[in-house]
């Protein structure tokens, strides 16, 4: 009797794999590789760009020797700007528009946390400003404190996402701009969702192209919805007061004013 491993072995040639089966197998392997590459890209886009851009933006803020510390080194607290040093928007100092990619201001938004401080630089191109420096100023629009519209833009996702929480802003919230010369405290008035082509939102009078400026506006623009550039989220505000930079800190960024 022949045992199983002693049976005569067949010497027939193996059957070849059909060409279509080989092609399907190769396609499957390519799809797996593509999936891995796509997954790595998503990780890079959502996480690494945030880390890299946040570090760059923090370094930019720290390089500005005029940026006011929120807490004194001695731990004695800070001086709050007194009411007699809060001045009318009509007397606000207005700087000249700086050279492209120059950082000229920082932005504090109490609604987004007491530690929110982001640099504002000239221009709104992605590679030179938005992807690296954070918040960009639309060239040709007003500068901080100007009669007209100080219009700025930033990412809502990725690259440090300075405007990530723009939808949390409420009417009356403070938007504080700091320059070497002055503090400018704006208040949110309204928001809207528009098409990318509706550039009139950054006109001197928002939404009214050609109209003569009648107030001191600020406009924030970013992509909408999240992870899409199909539309734009736009938040508007007006200047409440300005103060000399050496007068102290606005109570708004210290959580002492609503």
Image (cartoon, rainbow, N blue to C red):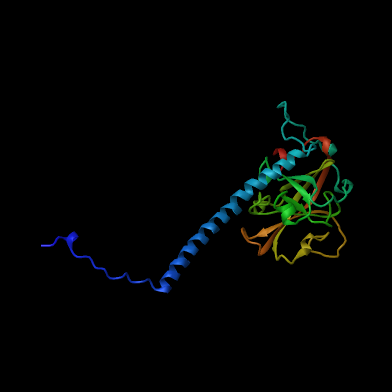
Nearer-the-camera pick, 198 or 171: 198
Residue at 67 percent across and 47 percent down: it is: 53
Q: Up-down: is 101 above or below 249?
A: below
Which quarter of the rendered picture does the C terminus lie within?
A: top right
What is the number of callouts on the image?
0
Residue 55, horizontal then vertical, whole percent: 67, 43
Q: Up-down: is 64 above or below 11?
A: above
Residue at 74 percent across and 53 percent down: it is: 128
Nearer-the-camera pick, 61 or 153: 61
Residue 116, horizontal then vertical, whole percent: 68, 43
Residue at 67 percent across and 53 percent down: it is: 166
Whether residue 188 is visible here, answered yes or no, is no
Which quarter of the rendered picture does the N terminus lie within?
A: bottom left
Q: Up-down: is 181 above or below 190?
A: above
Q: Is residue 143 found left or right of 110 in the rendered image?
A: right
Residue at the extreme left: 1
Nearer-the-camera pick, 239 or 19: 19
Residue 88, horizontal then vertical, whole percent: 86, 45
């Amino acid at each position: 009797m022949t045992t199983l491993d002693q049976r005569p072995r067949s010497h027939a040639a193996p059957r070849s794999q059909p060409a279509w089966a080989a092609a399907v197998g190769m396609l499957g392997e390519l799809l797996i590789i593509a999936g891995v590459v796509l997954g790595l890209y998503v990780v890079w886009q959502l996480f690494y760009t945030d880390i890299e851009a946040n570090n760059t933006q923090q370094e930019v803020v720290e390089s500005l020797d005029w940026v006011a510390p929120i807490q004194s080194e001695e731990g004695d607290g800070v001086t709050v700007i007194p009411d007699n040093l809060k001045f009318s928007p009509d007397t606000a100092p207005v700087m000249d528009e700086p050279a492209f990619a120059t950082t000229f201001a920082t932005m504090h938004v109490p609604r987004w946390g007491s530690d929110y401080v982001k640099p504002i630089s000239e221009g709104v191109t992605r590679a030179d400003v938005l992807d690296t420096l954070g918040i960009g100023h639309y060239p040709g629009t007003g500068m901080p404190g100007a009669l007209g519209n100080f219009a700025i833009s930033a990412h809502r996702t990725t690259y440090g996402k300075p405007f990530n929480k723009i939808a949390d802003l409420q009417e009356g919230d403070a938007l504080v701009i700091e320059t070497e010369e002055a503090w400018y405290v704006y208040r949110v008035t309204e928001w809207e969702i528009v098409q990318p082509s509706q550039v009139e939102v950054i006109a001197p009078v928002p939404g009214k192209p050609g109209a003569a400026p009648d107030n001191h506006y600020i406009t924030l623009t970013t992509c909408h919805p999240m992870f899409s550039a199909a539309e734009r989220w736009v938040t508007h505000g007006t200047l409440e007061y300005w103060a000399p930079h050496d007068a102290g800190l606005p109570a708004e960024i210290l959580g002492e004013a609503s």
